[in-house]
Image (spheres, rainbow, N blue to C red):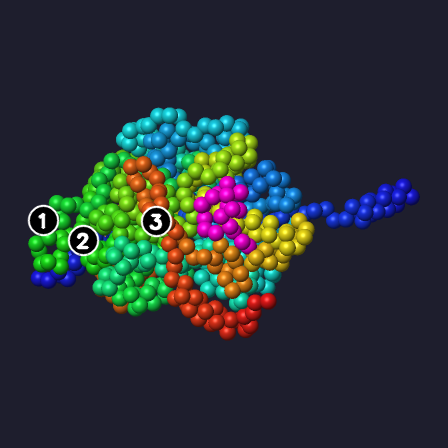
């Protein structure tokens, strides 16, 4: 009889109190082990530390605390899919995924579309996913690979006084879905602008690139672009230095432009350039908040020594964009504990303004932009940064450069239409 | 002669140099397989571990500092000293000998007489364990390895050969690091051959390789010999780790250099030290020439798979490899 009373009391309390507010779940598919760990760690640390700071400083987002369950993918596509399956139902359900791998992204696109969970692939993944009518659950703002290719060519065009007619450009790329992404754009730009394009693939992992750089030495292209990741970047920069290639004519995509990529080559890397979709350095108030609320309290995801590095900053930027989308979703939904569908609506209505960036302690860190159903890809802007081997620092050498959105829009339309036809999707924006 | 001819020569020269680097990795496999019949899957990770340890010692890094800091809330990272390269190499070798002793004492001593596949599986476990220990001990960040080796094109060779092929030829490109690697490999092979032929321990090692039960019956300590062999493989791994680590920085992808050694072993045989060298040279030249001549026609990036095709072609005619021992079983 006594037990029955206790059970009835517990049930009544539960009904009166209503459901407890669940955490906002942002799984982190990270890689802290394996051949790409050196890049995976700072990104994962930046991603985690920003959310920890929001929990410690603000009590989460809109009063709801954030949970970031981490799952190790080892940059392995199969493990990445396993991680997705094992984390998607944590708590009230995952709200967003950022796998930091184009291979994993390609596998997750059909899964997240079926499960109704947003996927944010910031500057990687399937470029045509910027077409929100065909890929309603996938977002790749603020810039994508095709933007990157176009921005690099625009920068070179500026350096060459406005014309690339008769010039030669080599693309050294990781022989994978990731590395092959810019080829179509560069081929079209080559035909349009009159430069010769030479495509030079490097097989995973890229530890040995003698043949590729002997070819570059023989053919003497005016510029070399690189779409590399991991050890491929370090070896390529070392080999370019070995053949005395002018480093200021060697430009990597944003995934080939971290400190990890240039430091091993020592003085030889001086002058190397790379794209970046955000600013660099620690001169932003947000870092002081991370230091005070996370690192100094012993809550940092790593050793706390990566703050301000390029990939840490990128992870933090990705987390900030996710948090802002969640905040937008909460405003639209009118409650704090949002669902994945509401998170998607928040991402699609995301508006990053200069004023908001300043409030976040990140004035000028990234571009202002609005997301819409028609454009999940953001503004497609990037800086060019250059490495100074003496001071061991990157510095921005240009303002934000725009990509050729007319050409990219056409390519996106073609690719998205092909995907829609293959998968029986009727593109639509409500 | 036109520029193309000289560029072909350049490709061959660079193929030979790359082959030496492959052979350095393959040598470690050969040493252990020859003495104990174990195909050591962990050889690539041993090269990584040795290079990590070398950089850690040189920079005075506190081993397991992340773990210590996490458990005790301390903030220790390094001892604040810098150790000269030569002394650090010696200390790293001490670590590798200790590793060899541990491997023998806690793994392979208990697996004597087991099937080769069991021993192979044990080395797979060892590889993952060692990779994890390396991560915990020294961290996952990319480390710059500077032991004073020269790098970059040899300008002397470039300038003095530039006249050969006309205006379109820029002189031979030879990386100074590759030259050093070739010299080191030659010395290493000579030392290993002299050691195995002319020293008491070397002869004992060969006896164990031929028939470990017979060797045991004449008083040779199997434990000692196997520790010796794993130590030698550790030394070879250290040399390979230095050469490869100097090119790309010391990072966890270094363990994947083992993939480059497999076709060399298939071609050169698993039991021959000269076979590892000759196999490395053939694979190096073969893959570079194929990439140079056929690669552009079929989209490039042929080296990884062509090395295996080349090795398989050799296997069709000599299943034991070029220098491997032919096994004749009479029924």
Q: Which residue is mark 2?
A: B13
Magenta stretch, residue numbers: A350-368
Which of the 4 image quadrants contains residue A306?
top left
Residue B193 - label: none
Residue appearing at x 29%, y 58% in the figure: A157
Q: Residues within 10 Å of mark 2 (few under 14, many from 20)?
A: some
Q: Which residue is mark 1?
A: B160
Task: Determine the chain carrying the residue at label 1.
Answer: B
Residue appearing at x 25%, y 54% in the figure: A213
User: Residue A340, can we see it?
Assistant: no
Q: Position of residue A351 (x, y in %)?
A: 54, 53
Residue appearing at x 26%, y 52% in the figure: A249
Number of the front mark, 1 or 3: 3
Number of the front mark, 1 or 2: 1
Foreground residue, A404 or A356? A356
Residue appearing at x 49%, y 65% in the figure: A131
> For numbered disc 1, what is the local secondary structure?
helix
Q: CA distance from mark 1 to mark 2?
A: 16 Å
Q: Which residue is mark 3?
A: A398
Which of the 4 image quadrants contains residue A415?
bottom left
Labels 1 and 2: the sequence-earlier one: 2
Foreground residue, A362 or B271? A362
């Amino acid at each position: 009889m006594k037990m029955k009373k206790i059970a009835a009391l517990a049930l009544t309390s539960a009904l009166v109190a209503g459901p407890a507010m669940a955490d906002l779940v942002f799984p982190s598919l990270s890689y802290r082990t394996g051949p790409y760990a050196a890049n995976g760690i700072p990104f994962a640390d930046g991603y985690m530390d920003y959310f920890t700071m929001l929990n410690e400083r603000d009590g989460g987002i809109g009063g709801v605390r954030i949970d970031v369950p981490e799952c190790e993918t080892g940059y392995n596509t199969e493990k990445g899919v396993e991680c997705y399956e094992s984390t998607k139902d944590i708590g009230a359900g995952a709200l967003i995924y950022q796998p930091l791998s184009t291979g994993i992204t390609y596998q997750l696109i059909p899964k997240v579309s079926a499960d109704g969970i947003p996927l944010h692939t910031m500057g990687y993944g399937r470029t045509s996913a910027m077409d929100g009518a065909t890929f309603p659950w996938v977002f790749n703002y603020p810039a994508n690979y095709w933007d990157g290719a176009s921005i690099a060519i625009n920068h070179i065009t500026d350096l060459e006084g406005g014309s690339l007619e008769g010039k030669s450009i080599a693309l050294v790329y990781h022989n994978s879905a990731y590395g092959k992404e810019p080829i179509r754009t560069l081929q079209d730009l080559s035909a349009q602008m009159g430069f010769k394009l030479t495509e030079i693939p490097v097989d995973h992992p890229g530890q040995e690139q003698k043949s590729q750089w002997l070819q570059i030495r023989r053919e003497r292209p005016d510029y070399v672009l690189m779409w590399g990741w991991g050890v491929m970047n370090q070896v390529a920069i070392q080999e370019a230095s070995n053949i005395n290639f002018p480093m200021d004519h060697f430009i990597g995509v944003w995934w080939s432009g971290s400190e990890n990529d240039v430091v091993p080559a020592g003085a030889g890397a001086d002058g190397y350039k790379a794209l970046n979709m955000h600013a660099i350095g620690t001169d932003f108030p947000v870092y002081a908040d991370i230091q005070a609320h996370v690192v100094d309290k012993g809550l940092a995801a790593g050793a706390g020594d990566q703050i301000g590095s390029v990939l840490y900053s990128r992870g933090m930027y990705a987390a900030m964009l996710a948090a802002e989308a969640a905040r937008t979703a909460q405003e639209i939904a009118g409650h704090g504990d949002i669902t994945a569908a509401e998170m998607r609506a928040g991402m699609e209505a995301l508006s990053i303004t200069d004023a908001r960036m300043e409030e976040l302690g990140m004035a000028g860190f990234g571009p202002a932009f609005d997301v819409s159903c028609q454009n999940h890809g953001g503004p497609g802007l990037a800086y060019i940064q250059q490495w100074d081997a003496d001071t061991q620092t990157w510095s921005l050498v240009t303002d934000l450069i725009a990509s050729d959105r007319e050409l990219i829009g056409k390519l996106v339309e073609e690719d998205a239409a092909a995907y829609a036809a293959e998968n029986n999707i009727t593109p639509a924006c409500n | 002669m036109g520029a193309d001819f000289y560029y072909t020569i350049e490709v061959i020269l660079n193929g030979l140099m790359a082959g030496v680097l492959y052979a350095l990795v393959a040598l470690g496999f050969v040493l252990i397989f020859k003495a104990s019949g174990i195909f050591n899957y962990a050889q690539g990770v041993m090269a990584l571990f040795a290079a990590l340890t070398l950089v850690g010692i040189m920079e005075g890094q506190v081993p397991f500092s992340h773990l210590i800091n996490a458990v005790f809330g301390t903030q220790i990272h390094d001892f604040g000293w810098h150790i000269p390269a030569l002394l650090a190499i010696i200390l790293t070798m001490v670590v590798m000998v200790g590793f060899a002793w541990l491997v023998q004492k806690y793994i392979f001593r208990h697996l004597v007489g087991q099937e080769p596949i069991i021993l192979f599986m044990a080395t797979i476990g060892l590889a993952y364990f060692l990779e994890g220990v390396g991560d915990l001990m020294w961290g996952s960040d990319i480390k710059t390895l500077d032991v004073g080796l020269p790098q970059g094109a040899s300008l002397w060779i470039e300038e003095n050969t530039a006249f050969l092929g006309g205006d379109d030829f820029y002189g031979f490109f030879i990386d100074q690091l590759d030259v050093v690697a070739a010299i080191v490999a030659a010395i290493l092979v000579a030392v290993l051959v002299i050691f195995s032929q002319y020293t008491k321990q070397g002869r004992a090692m060969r006896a164990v390789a031929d028939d470990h039960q017979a060797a045991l019956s004449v008083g040779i300590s199997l434990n000692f010999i196997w520790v010796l062999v794993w130590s030698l493989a550790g030394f070879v791994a250290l040399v390979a780790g230095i050469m490869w680590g100097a090119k790309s920085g010391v990072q966890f992808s270094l363990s994947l250099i083992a993939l480059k050694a497999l076709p060399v072993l298939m071609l050169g045989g698993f039991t021959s030290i000269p076979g590892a060298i000759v196999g490395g040279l053939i694979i190096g030249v073969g893959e570079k020439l194929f990439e140079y001549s056929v690669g552009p026609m079929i989209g490039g990036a042929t080296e990884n798979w062509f090395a295996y095709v080349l090795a398989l072609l050799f296997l069709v005619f000599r299943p034991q490899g070029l220098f491997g021992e032919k096994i004749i079983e009479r029924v």
